Image: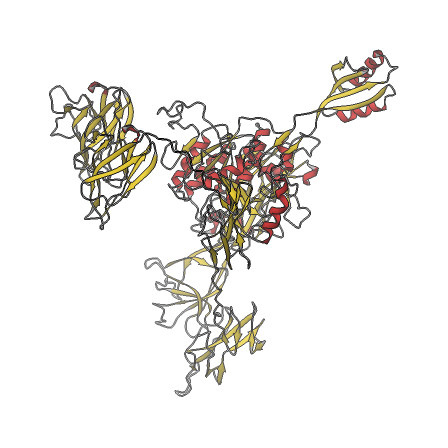
Amino acid sequence: MSKTSLWLGLVFLAAFLMTSFYLLTPQVFAKSNQNTNQIIVKYKEDKTPKILKGVVNFLKNRRQIAEKNQKLNSLKNMYVIEASAETLEETIKDLETDENVEYAVPDRELNADIIISDPYYTDYYQWYLRNPNYLDMNKIWEQQASSSAVMAIIDTGIDLSHEDLQANLWINHNEVDNNGIDDDGNGYIDDIYGWNSYNDTNDIRDDVGHGTAVYSVAAATANNNLGIVGMAWTGKVMVIKANYPGSSTFNTSSILKAIAYASSFPEVKVINLSLGATVSNQAEQDAITDIVDQNKIVVVASVGNNSADAIHFPAGYSGVLGASAYSKTDFAYFSNYGFGVDLAAPGDDIYTAKPSNSYGFNDGTSFASPMIGALGFLYAQKHPDYSALQIVEILKNFTKPPFGQSNIAPEWWNSRWGYGRISSDGWENNCNGGENIKTEALIKSYDLEFELEDQYPLYPEGAISSLQTIAINGWATSNNLINYKLEWGEGIEPISWSDSGISLVNNGTGGISNGLLGVFDLRQIPESGVYTLRLIINGEADCLGNIVGQDRIKLVIEKQYSVSGKIKNLSGAPIRVPVVFYTDYANKIYEKFAWSNEDTGEYVNNELSSGVYIVAPHIFGEETYEPEFWSITLDSANTQWKDINFIQQTGTPPSPTPTSTPTPTPTPTPAQTCTDSDGGKDYLVKGTGSGWNTDTEFVGFYDTCYQDYWANLVSSCTGDTCYLAEKYCQDQYVKTELWVPCAYGCSDGACLPEPTPTPTPAPTCADTDGGLNYAQKGHISGTGLGCNNSGWDDFCYGDILQEAHCGSLNQCFTDAYTCPYGCSDGACLPEPTPTPTPIPNSKVVIYAQGTQVDNVYPSMALEIKGTRVKTFTNISSYKAYEYQHNAPITASDITLRFLNDTSTSTQDRNLRVDKIILDGMTYETEDYSTFSVGSWSSFNGCGQGYKQSEWLHCNGTFSFDSDANSSILQIYASGSPALGEYPIIDLNIDQVKVGSFKSLSNTLQVFAYKHPSKLLPKDIKLVFANDKYSAASNEDRNLLVDKIVLDGVTYETEAPSVYSSGAWSSTLKACATGYLKTQKLACNGYFQF
């Protein structure tokens, strides 16, 4: 989630005043000179062309220049000669030492200057773009070439009418705008600017604002004298809307469909996902895996804003670049961190576009992510032949260190900054003798078959031997490869690395592209815990310390030892009772119960650690006879019992050492029983008492505190080495439990309880104008975050209003708002009163009624040309609802929307619309030319085309139309279910499927369809698409078609001239043709009229 306003502080006003004097100054810079392979040579005036020819021949013989040389005719004694890139510098040196040459200089490219004229392109508003301490985007923009590459943003959509966001919006030129036809045949109708993957339409309008802001960071228009500048303003950005309507939440299916849509276009090189959740989803990982395996698209995602060491998905998936955020001076306080972080980018005080041509400051990793995506997109534009992983390595290789560090090692990684702060330094990418570095480095963690990274609990089943060796797959390639290596270390930021147990393919000397990198023997990892496995690629690149690529994954290893075997008594018969594995039999400290197979006596246990145990038979936890004892040693290298030694048959068991001699059990006197004042193991109460310390000594005792080690008794202590020695009674004996940790300290023989926290006063914030009130000057004050003692006033800067207001948690914010009619004294000026001009208008009268649920009646919205102009509530008894419009309209402009459908087991809120009267003209809802074309959805299914005598049972719309060139088809049908699903009718017109009607219940329903041209009955085919028969449940899914009504004419299915000519077949029964009204279709087939 992103925070959508600027935190106010004392710095804000000062910085604003310091930068305001050049707020509207255009930024001008020239493109850098680029060396070509040509040299401009001027010969001394007394030298002849013959001398030139000799010099050229000499250089040709040395293979330093090509055949081409050309005289600059209008310039005296000046020539252009061409060398190779490898010999350019050497050739210039040779020419400079020649006595016949006056000078030799490299040719260079010059380009027109670029002017950035956008008013918010300043070091205050967009502080990160041109400052060399951050991104320094000028060096890229001044050299950027045009490209067909596209960046895709999956979010909440975009404000299509925003003044600063239209120029760089991707357009599908293979689709004709809004003709209702899938012109390019890609399965998406009218996907002109992108797609809405939640409701499968082309409506990408932003109903939240988040997507608009994210898009503007990447692609706001430059040089239009408006707003801000997007990082990738030289390219095109595809928008895919995937959120729940009106919400900033998403479901997995809409994200998967969005990814599928974006990846279906070969020109898409980057996908940005400024969204996520703390729980992973295998379907999402599989979709990402498919993209990574193709190695064509870079995927970037935000890591979340919970200030936590937490993996955020999809940023945490393997193959996705996770984006953390930083501010002008430090790591952003809100940004998540941890193993999901790959790169850090600006994410605090980011000035973005907002809906309705407005702008404001935002915080969040949602805005760091599109910066990384945009930078990768620019690299992809420059290098169209690079793979996605090669683009990723440029981003990872060329970074800036965290604030306060002068540099970082080539193999450096940090849980907050990842591989570093993104930088435009990778634009040249030529630190190997002028040659670009092309490297691919990725460990495919989703190919490993045990618990590893990203909270995927793939615990091994059975013995550890099944996971002793695993294969490591991925990419390790480079155009200047020396070798690659795999190493592992403890923790997520290991201080040391080991290659123990790792075997590389060809010893790591050859490149691997999506294949086996090596094999890892997990037995080399000593204990369960968190580890890191990293891939390092070494190549010839001095500026990178010869490390040209790297990747790492987190391994969460859970070592479990599977042990099995038989325990027998002295006679050799298996013991068929439960046994207990004791680590300290004398104090009855045990690790595990185990149950045997009653027939075989076989014991199996999968959760024992290495060690030595005393094993004694028990039944329901009580010893029932003189026990037999064994010493058992477990070894992680051997999954069976390593050593089973019989010790003795009767008596008290010794310690785990087989040579121990049991001590006789003392017999206490009745008066000398063990007592404990705190009742046993009560760590918060000091206990005192008495009991047998040895077989012959009866002593008093009390609980004590100790520091560091048990003999160092103290009256009180705190810290990690502060413990309680808790005395307690076991039978007649005094026992001691050592190493009881006291989290809040220990005092006088008891652990201190958790202290009661001192309540923090709730923050306050008050706003005199009530909030975002642009028409009134307000003042905010309080104790919340961003507030100060004197408070803040709304104030104007030109036509821009800085509106101060309170947040939901009583923070102090400010938003920048452009006043359309000017700004004065901290408030927007009102719209000038226009000279009234008589305009024609229309009157709409709606006759409707409704049924209630929980005493709430239907609400109905009146929409004119897609804009809601009036909402009618509490529609109960039949009556007229009126609206006066301020312009003339037609019936086709009107839509009536049912807003609040719901139902209970006994009630159903429904809406009936009888008719409308528009300017005296009546439109009846049962007229075949006036019908519902709304889209209905419900758990029990609703079809289209409700008429006067029927009710709307789902949220949906009536739209009115009187198109004489179209045809209206109504289908009356019902069905019986099988296996929880009702029949489906596919409607075919002229052998082309135009729609489907689902959820046909036992009740006869009517389904309507409008065709853009006139139809005849013979054009219509109704196909029964999902016949199903279940012998097990004796269910048969059947379809009944009563009749169709085409343009008001009824065609009954039992009429002699209207019949089924479909071909019916079934594996369970035969079906003939020609079903009448009273019969049902029992097999897949169709009606042809």
* Quadrant assignment, res 517: top right
- Quarter of the figure that contains the C terminus: top left
In front of the other: 458 or 14: 14
Instruction: Name the residue furthest front.
Output: 835
Q: How is the image coloured?
A: secondary structure
Placement of 595 over or under 30, stated as above or below:
below
Question: In this rendering, does residue 484 appear at all?
Answer: no
Rendering coords of residue 394 (x, y %): 61, 36
Rendering coords of residue 128 (x, y %): 60, 42
* Quadrant assignment, res 122: top right
Question: In this rendering, does residue 219 appear at all?
Answer: yes
In front of the other: 982 or 367: 367
In front of the other: 81 or 692: 81
Rendering coords of residue 1017 (x, y %): 20, 20
Placement of 1071 over or under 526, stated as above or below:
above
Placement of 933 over or under 623, stated as above or below:
above
Rendering coords of residue 245 (x, y %): 37, 41
How many tags in the picture?
0
